[in-house]
Image (spheres, rainbow, N blue to C red):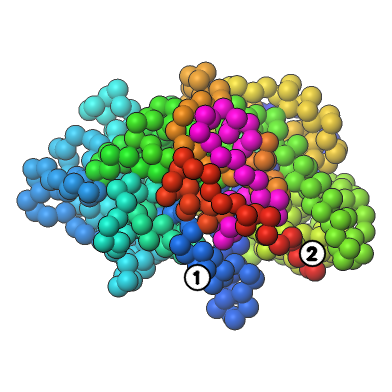
Amino acid sequence: MAGLHTFDGVYVRERHFAPLGLGIITLGIYPLVWWYKINREMRDLGEPLGMGRRKSLLPARLAAVGVLLLMSAAGCSSSAVTTTVGPAATTRPSAVSTTTTDAADGATTTVPELLSPPYFESGECVTKATRSLAADPDRVIECGHLVVLEDRSRPEGTRVRLPVMIARTQNPVPAPDPVVYLAGGGGHNHLLYADFFMDGVGDAVLERRDFIQYNQRGADLTSPDLSCPGLAGFLFGLAAEPLGQQEWADRHLAFLSRCREALVAAGVDLSMYNSAVNAADADELRRALGYEQANFYGTSYGTRLGLDLIRDYPAGVRSVILDSVYPPQAGFYTESGANLQRAFEYLFSACADDDGCAANYPQLGTAFYETIDRLDASPEWVDTAGGRVLVDGGIFMDAASLYLYSPDGIGRVPDAITRAARGDFGPLAEPITGAITSSDINWGMWYSMQCREEVPFESLESALELGASLQPGVASHYVDGFARFHFALCEGWGSGTADPIESLAVTSDVPALVLAGGYDPVTPPAWGKSTAANLDNAFYYEFPSVGHGVVRSTACGLSIALQFLEDPVSEPDIVCIAEMPLPNFSG
């Protein structure tokens, strides 16, 4: 293959081009994690932003649903390797082993060479967050790796190693089925933030059942690791130059072409890094840990894995929680611009209905779209934690949308927009960093997945047709930029084309809880509603005052999820939804 395709002179306008909001548009938890980072830093200064650890969500401790894999740091013995750590632990005969050390984290792991995957091997916790949890005397944590085949049709082929953390319930009469968290992303280094999920959700789940977190294949700390080293710095460098769309796209595509070539040269089979294989890994994790069934809880991209699981491995699934749904039948690239515009229009309507917001921020929608046009015509310099960058309309939109992910952040958006309209980007300086890129995503995994199962089932023509109904600045960024870039990239990525079933709505009778947030800018309520309509035993609930990730960000969502876990075939008490406060638009 000659390499990735360029845009071949499609663009006629020369202006600075936003880096496509890579930290935002991926279907992950990065925006909530960003909010968490800021909360942690501000907490240390005694100024929590409103989503502080233990404080805001633990009143719903008995009503939360879990997201964290509790795993205690236990090494492999010299005589046997533990392959099941669930209710019925077993051991296999010892195998020839080698010891490896993670260069970035310093953790060592004993690697058995002769066992047949899938199996679990106990080992050290691989991130600061998981080690901190394991060191807590009030917790029972096990860590290790799930070992699976890269290609299940090649038993002698490459082995994939996924880091896992298991949190054990200390209930004397535990439920037999754990909660396994399916992270957003894909390719996200989820265990880097294991404490974030344990603090808000996992602790509540542990009242009754084990809680399991892990990194999906291709993510950081897995082997093989599908990272594109240096991409974040490269994109920040591009954001500091006044480039036209053509030059930006060509340089970015050239960088990614080199990344792809390096992965292939290292022996990575890019066709084996996708949602169907990720779902198979999740099922093998359940089996390797000795659980007859599990409850799978996914957020964002993780809901795609949950849907794959109930389609392909229903016998092992007791229930699924699908929070902020990314269904296979959705047109991600076709609809991204419309989804973001819908969320902002929802905000503008809410502000107009709020007396204080309407008085303080009149004509908010006009200010928003005029600011996009102004910045597209003449990008402005902004100092961020990542460096000084030129901000155009695309980066501005993506940075503002970060606030829509968090209930506390939603109320800050009118002030951020109004100040940006005056040339003051203070409230957006931090999220602009996330709008340019996320260093916690392995983009080799993301592109392998999207180029296989998303782009082949969409068309640029459909995206352009829908884009004609959008505000010009939104269409320019999400269609002329984001969608067109990915269609060009995927022509040469080489991860194959998924089975057409990967683009069809999933039908199932497995009990499902489907949740959506009204302000969600990336997975709109319509996606959740259409998903639930195809599931025979689904409960669908929309949270009008919430953004992306309902369970982790609201006590009400946690309460409903916990009720569902206890009895997934009976409708939960949802009175708390109507009692949730509206966003505080005081700024």
Q: Position of residue 568 (x, y in %)?
A: 45, 43
Answer yes or no: is residue 235 visible.
Answer: no
- In magenta stretch: residue 275: no
Q: Residue at x 29, y 55 (%)?
A: 174
> Could you tell whether 478 is left or right of 252 in the image?
right
Q: Residues within 10 Å of mark 1 (few under 14, many from 20)?
A: some
Residue 310 visible in rendering: yes
Task: Please state the horizontal and vertical placement of residue 76, each as a whole percent of the image.
Answer: 16, 54
Of callouts 1 and 2, the N-terminal one: 1
Residue 303 is situated, as x and y percent measured from the top left of the image, at: 51, 39
In the image, what residue type sits under mark 2? Phe
Q: Quadrant of residue 540?
A: top right
Residue farthest bottom in this picture = 46
The residue that appears at 35% across and 49% down in the rendered structure is 178
Residue under label 1? 54
Look at the image and tell me in which quarter the C terminus lies: bottom right
Q: Which residues are magenta?
A: 528-556
In the image, is 242 to the left or to the right of 210? right
Question: Residue 22, image x and y in percent?
Answer: 62, 45
Tell me the residue that label 2 is attached to: 585
User: As rendered, which of 565 and 201 lies closer to the eye?
Assistant: 565
Q: Is residue 214 above or below residue 261?
A: below
Depth check: give the residue in front, 515 or 419: 515
Circle 1/circle 2 CB separation < 8 Å: no
Which residue type does callout 1 highlight?
A: Arg
Q: Is residue 341 above or below residue 308?
A: below
